[in-house]
Structure formats: C-alpha cells, structure tokens
Amino acid sequence: MFETIRYDVKDGVAWLYLNRPDKLNAFVAQMNREIKDAVKAASADDEVRCIVMIGEGRAFCSGQDLSEVDENMDHGQVLRDHYGPMVKQIRQCEKPIVAAVNGVAAGAGFSLALACDFRLVSEKASFVNAFVHVGLIPDSGNLYFLAQLVGQAKAAELSILGEKVPAAEAVDIGLANRMIPAETFEEEVSTFAARLAVMPTKAIGLIKRSLKAASVLSFEDYLELEAQGQRTAGLTADHREGVEAFMQKRKPVFSGK
Amino acid sequence: MNSFEFIETSVTGGTAVIELNRPRQLNSLNRKMVGEIVEAMEAFDRDDNVRVIVLTGKGRAFSAGADIDEMAEDDPIRLELLNQFADWDRLALIKKPIIGAVKGFVFGGGFELALCCDILIAASGTEFSFPEVSIGVMPGAGGTQRLTKLAGRTKALEWLWTGERIPAEAALAHGVINKIVAPELLMEETLKFASRIAKQPPLSVRLIKDSVNKAVDYPLYEGMQYERKNFYLLFASQDQKEGMNAFVEKRKPNYKGR
C-alpha cells in the first residue's frame, strides 16, 4: 500500500523505512503523505508500542526532492499541504518515536529527525540545515525543535552557516542521544526500540504530552495538566503492575495499557 | 424516563447526565434525537433531585452535525410547517445549569447544541466547526447568533465563512469554552465540576443563570433592574437565611433549594 516507504510491524515496533534509496530518500509529496499515514496507522494500532524511522541505503533523508520543485511553486502552500500535516501527525503521536539516522539528514530530512523523540545516530550520520544554501529558511518545524534542543545560539549557527554536523558533534551539542558504530547500527537500534516497546506506553505518551505542554502553558496551567496526567497514569494497568512488581521484588511486565 | 431511542440518561447524586447515543453515526443529530434531548432536559429541570444537567456524547465524537439525509430534500414551506427549531427554543428555557462535556468533532448542529450549554468542558484535541457554508446553507439553530455573542462578530464571521476547524485552544482563547481537560478524564473532570455547582444553593444558581442570560440581551440599565429583583427575591428563600446564618456561626451551610 506504500510506495515511497516500507512499513513493517514486528514485536511491538513499527519500522518505517524511507524507501527511495537512489534519491537519498528525498521527499516527494507522496512520501510526506505516506509517512503521515503510516504514523497515523501506528498510533492507532494497539500492537505498536514504539515507532522507528530509518533510511534505506546510505542516507537517512536528503530533504525535498529538488526535481519536484519548479519556479512557480508556492513554497508556503507546499508546507501547509504536505510537510505541515506530516510533522503534525508525528507530534500528535503519543507513542515513542525513534529517528534512526543511518546517514545524512539534510534539509527537511533534518527536520523529520528533529520531530522525533530520540535521535540515534550512526557514526556515518550527519545533519545539515542546508536550506540557507538555496536561499530558504529551515522548515517543517525545524527551528521550533532545534532551538529547544540546542539553544538559540547554536540553532542560529547551524541554520545560518548551514555547516555539516558530524555524528559525534551532534551528540556533544545535545542534538542526538547516542552514536552507534555503523556495523552494529540496525542491531542496536532494534535493541533500543525493543526496550521502549515493553515499557509503560501510556505513561510515555503522558510524558510526551506534558513535555509539549510545558513550553506553552503558564506554570499554574502546567501544574493542572500535570495533575490530570498523573491521574490518568495512576489509572493504568501498568502503574498497578509496576507497584506490584516492586513490592514482590520481581521484574514488571507492562502491557502498555 | 429511559425509553429514549437516540439518547441515554442517568442521575447520580444531584447530577443528571444526557448522552447522545448514536456513536456509529458520530452522534449526528436527527429531529427525533433533538426532541428527546429537549424532553429529557425539561424533565430534569422539573425534577427536585436534579441540580445540574450534563450533556455529552457516546463514542469518539460529541456530534458531527445534523443528519444531512434527513433534510436534503426539504423545501421552505415544509420547513416552516415542521417548525423543527421550536424544540431548540425550549432548550434556552431550561433553568438549571447545563454543562456540556465535548470531545472529538463538534460540528454543525452538534456545535449549535454545544452552544446551548451554559458551561463547556472540552477534551484536548476537540475540534469545533460550522461547515454548513460548504454545502450551500448556514447554521439554522442559533449558530450565527450564539457564536457571535460568545466570540464576537470578528471571529464569528471568519469561522462561519470559512467553515474551518477550530481547535479547542482557539475556542478557549475566544471565550467559546470554559476549559480543556485530558481526554481520558473528560467525564471525571466534568462530573467533578458539576458536583461543585450542585453543592451551591440551587436558587442562587438558578437566578444567576437567569440574570446572566439577561445581560446578553438586555441594555445594561434594564439588566441591572432585572438583577436587582432577582437579588431581592433570594431574600425570600430559606437558603439565604441558612447561608448567612452559617457564615455568622462559622459553620458549613446546608442548602435545601427552598
């Protein structure tokens, strides 16, 4: 059903492969739509408790496919119609999303990785906010996320100079969570995803909800949202299981409910 | 009381709950359903055991709008003779507080029904919309009037002309709803709020609603005169004596609604 991506669910993990390797997984409108649809499907699928986005071939995603760009294109409308809905769907998702950045993540490909909760990077990976090189601004939520991750000063540097950030530096500046050797990359990503997939999924969703709200709400409003979040978490089976396992000195088995 | 086809009702403590019950049709409103809502509301309004009425919908949406099939073939004369909106007018006469608990889609007639509530509590992620314009009509059950009185002409025209979806946050910012809560806790938070109002002296609650409604329609001077009469009227109640005595005696009041 998908053409530009490959979507597999295995052991509680939804694997979303960007699948245009000969184009370095560059975005076309269809790929925006298919990523959005896949994330929507994964969000609704009770079996899925973690989502991984990864690139086929040597790149993660090189950004917009420039062969789809013509001089009459309304760049703003492309964002409203294609990229915006895609990143909104990702941000709405209350399951953990891992960007497994296997190679270059440039332009909107960088933005896609930023919209995820984790960035695990191969030592061969790199990030480039390449927009400025073609006289454009970072889009698809890029600066919104980037400034939160690395601070205003570094975000400005990365976006204005558009220099390549190698994997090790990405970890140093807080852009990526960890670097993994290329040979064991998929295996370690898989282990990481498997770990997330047996955690209390509902609580993870509520943590994501709270983090999102923290940047927009007043402190008082945030505390109320937090209380409602904790009330919701307190009603989950996983909370009961966690407490019970602790009392019985055994490992908890979380159902995600 | 519970012989309705399209709604379900229940009473717990002093709170009555009316649930739209066509979840598979996203609670789209048909004429019979509106009739049932009005009938249930009026019965609860007369019921001494009920102090607050909660209106909500079963399933993932409050209501996605009116049943289009039902009116696609209508003509003006038939509509005039049917006088279906008279049912809606009766909703405005309910004296007890009506608290709406909404989620998912609140569209068209569903939005108009929500606007008949005195307080609106929305689950986060709720979307409101008047999409009537996109099928060549407009709201007919108070949408243009009530939305304008709440949000003002500026926003009302924008929303009604475009038919765009209004996120809960925007509805909150423009005074259309009272608060946004976690979707998991919509009913819990609503019932908590309802029981808080249910504990207030019922006659005060009732005459406050009556007076505030007048503020929407009356010139200030007339409204002030109206408020004053209601204020005086409360001094004829047992609850006024009880409330003021309890205050002086530093104890909790016990209100009877008399």
Image (cartoon, coloured by chain):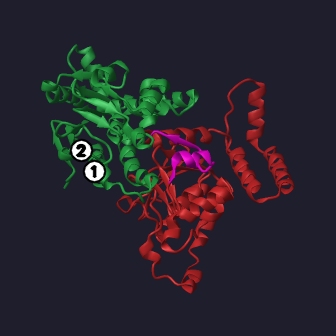
* Closest to the observer, B230 or B47: B230
Residue at 35% in and 54% down: A69
Amino acid residing under circle 1: Met
Q: Position of residue A60 (x, y in %)?
A: 24, 37
Chain that the image shows in red: B
Amino acid residing under circle 2: Asn
Q: Which residues are magenta?
A: B166-182
Residue at 81% in and 43% down: B235
Task: For the residues labelled 1 and 2, say whether their Cβ atoms are less than 8 Å apart.
Answer: yes
Q: Could one spot residue A56 in this view of the protein? A: yes
Q: Position of residue A236 (x, y in %)?
A: 33, 32
Q: Is residue B158 above or below residue A8?
A: below
Q: Which residue is mark 1?
A: A31
Q: Is residue B61 above or below residue A92?
A: below
- A250 relative position to B217: left or right: left
- B124 relative position to B205: left or right: left
Q: Residue under mark 1: which chain is it in?
A: A
Name the tint of chain A in the rendering.
green
Q: Which residue is mark 2?
A: A25
Which of the 4 quarters of the picture holds residue B213?
bottom right
Check the image and name the residue furthest to the bottom. B77
Label 1, residues with CA under 10 Å away: few <14, some 14-19, many ≥20? many
